[in-house]
Image (spheres, helix red, strand yellow):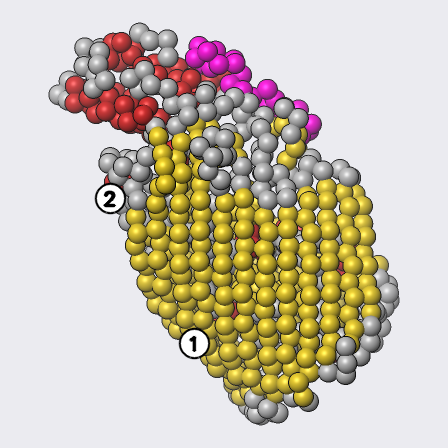
Amino acid sequence: MQSMKSTVLLLAGALALSPCLAAQEEAETQPAAAQATTQDDTFLDVVTVTATKREESLQDVPIAVTAVSELQMERSGLKDIRDLPLLATSFNMNSTQTESQGSTLRIRGVGTTGNNIGLESSVGVFIDGTYLSRPGVALGDQLDLEAIEVLRGPQGTLFGRNVSAGALNIRTKRPSLSRTDVFTNFGVGDFGAYNAQLGVTGPFSDSVGYRLSGAIRSQDGFVENTTGGESLNRDRYLLRGQLLFQLNDSASLRLIGDYSDADEQCCDAINLVESPAVALGSFSAAGLPANGGVLRTGDSAFEDRISNGEQFENPFDQTGFSAELNVDFGRSSTLTYIGSYREFFAGSVQNDFVGIKVYEVSPQEAAGFDTFDEIESSSHELRIAGDSDSLSWMLGGYYSDEDILEEVGFGLGTDFTAHMDAVLWNFAFGPVLGAAPLLGKVPLATGGTFADVLGADNQALAFAGGVDSASAFAQNVFRQQGESTSIFTHNTWRVSDSFSLVGGARYVEETKEGSFNQLGASNNACLRTLANAGALAAGAAGTGLEVVAGTIGNFSVGFSCFPFATPALGISVLPAEFSDKFEDEELVYTGKAVVEFTDKASAYASYTRGFKSGGFNLDSTAAAGGGDPRFASEKVDSIEIGFKSEFANRRARLNITAFDYDIEDFQVLEFTGVQFVTFNVPTAESQGLELELAARLGNSLRANFGYTYADSS
């Protein structure tokens, strides 16, 4: 969702031929958390979900949730969450610049742009109950899964922080305590693609079980640049190991460890529109190739999948551990503890998407400085839940901490100044350069007059006092340490056999410390351009040419002082180092009324207050000009009305949901052409309708259909 108005229509449909019953493991290896059980071959499967952190039927939970089973994932070819929109129309995902550091998850059209590591996603991703703090951390292949639940709408009461748009609840299969099973899965595709998975589960003893699984996936890149490099390939593997201890009849402990690695080239782009500066000869006039370094554009480039940049790189890996302890005290209560620790690393090499040397994120252009992200996080959740004849209750507490380190090495290439001369002086400044000779006698800070600039072959170079931007660089380091603490409750009161009230609340405290430091930088062309822009503005004062002088000076500084490759001197518009603290607290809550018309039809209405933490704009310009690098927390008020039904003798299921969001301080990341700006939009809205239809057309034929309409502004 952007600050501008957008409308999203999403449709999905599927027909599946399948046996009446999928092969099931023993009960303890396939718990109700994701099972689909069948009472009769003509019925739809009964889907059990954990959207309320309890095991309940999909049709009984008063939440808009899409439950994707193991069979659906297998038949659809789902490999990672990027494929999930095939099965859940309200969810979508896109990436820019890099996949691991620039991915955006959206539910119902609402999401947070992922290019800035200081921004957290509006869609929370949880695997086996543990929170994955950034979308890139969730990009690993989905291996040996039991189910994926797409929870739509704010879920902060039960799932905690940063789920103001919704949550993905991913559950892996548990170890078996009764028998040994082996599974394999292998597939091939075009562009040299292959995918292989292997796993084994079984008991060490009557009370200890294990599960080991692994996957490897490879595919050639399907975008090739004009120098022969490729992009958007796949080269990754994943290993996961589990131990299940049945401590006694009422207590179990599950330990999970995983490691994944990817060495991929992502994310180049294809130029669909040729720059208008080409037709005007702006590039050739600046001594560059007439095409500005873009050999292929338009439909032919898209059809042939040809880009114009150089090689992109985006390797990433992660290691994670989690533990889940469950103690059942009988009908009265159950105690659950979930703890986790995770490390994530992602490297990056990026360039300017054209075939000339304008800029690059690489050690070669940044005095040997690598670009990467490191995230280290841990979490602890303790909750106790119980039931009586009329009340289901839950109380809990949650704590998490996260340390982020981002290092960025950015450099300007040998063609940067000529490129600036082409796009600014030869093209963009056309409307004002007609009046510019009237400023010719204005003296410049670096010597000579503005007339010398107007008469130069390379006017951008002349306005920089003759200093070329080539080899300008910056080595920037960003850090953020965050802690989140909360307590929560969630309760269902069964007022009668057909009417229930649901109420929940969570109090959240957020604390973050963020900083930006520069280890090294050099850009004399920027400093001299800045001085000459000031001299030009002073010389134009009182002449009526202030707008002309301001346009030339401001845009020249904006490009020459490209903020990712400029010393952090803290003067004027130049980057400024910072070290600051962010604190916030919020009460999120929900209230719902549920009516059961029959055992096959029910409806609910809910109001929910959601919350997503603010933090720091981890960008070199965040504190420029004395600005505050912090941005405010995002809050959402959500109204939802849902209807769930089964009909045709339980052979068909229809669920309909209408929703309305009012969002306060919506967090936006915007690229201005020379910098990333993070800010809060005071208000944003999203309304829409969702429809999900499932039908069993025969013993071996099922159909699914999904429709989502979202209008966001």
List x then y, in percent, for residue 134. Answer: 51, 55
Mark 2 highlights which residue? 626
In this rendering, the answer to whether 198 lies above or below 543 is: below
The residue depicted at 48 percent of the width and 19 percent of the height is 276
Mark 1 highlights which residue? 487
172 in magenta: no
User: For the magenta stretch, what is the residue range?
Assistant: 280-305
Q: Is residue 61 visible?
A: no
304 in magenta: yes
The residue depicted at 68 percent of the width and 45 percent of the height is 235
Residue 342 is tagged as: none
* Secondary structure of the residue carrying numbered label 1: strand
Distance, label 2 to label 1, CA atoms, is 37 Å
Amino acid under disc 1: Ile
List x then y, in percent, for residue 549. Answer: 24, 21
In this rendering, the answer to whether 441 lies above or below 345 is: above
User: In which quarter of the view is residue 37 placed?
Assistant: bottom right
* Secondary structure of the residue carrying numbered label 2: helix
Label 2, residues with CA under 10 Å away: few <14, some 14-19, many ≥20: some
Viewer-nearest residue: 249 or 12? 249
Q: Is residue 486 visible?
A: yes
Mark 2 or mark 1: whose residue is earlier in sequence = 1
List x then y, in percent, for residue 647. Answer: 73, 71
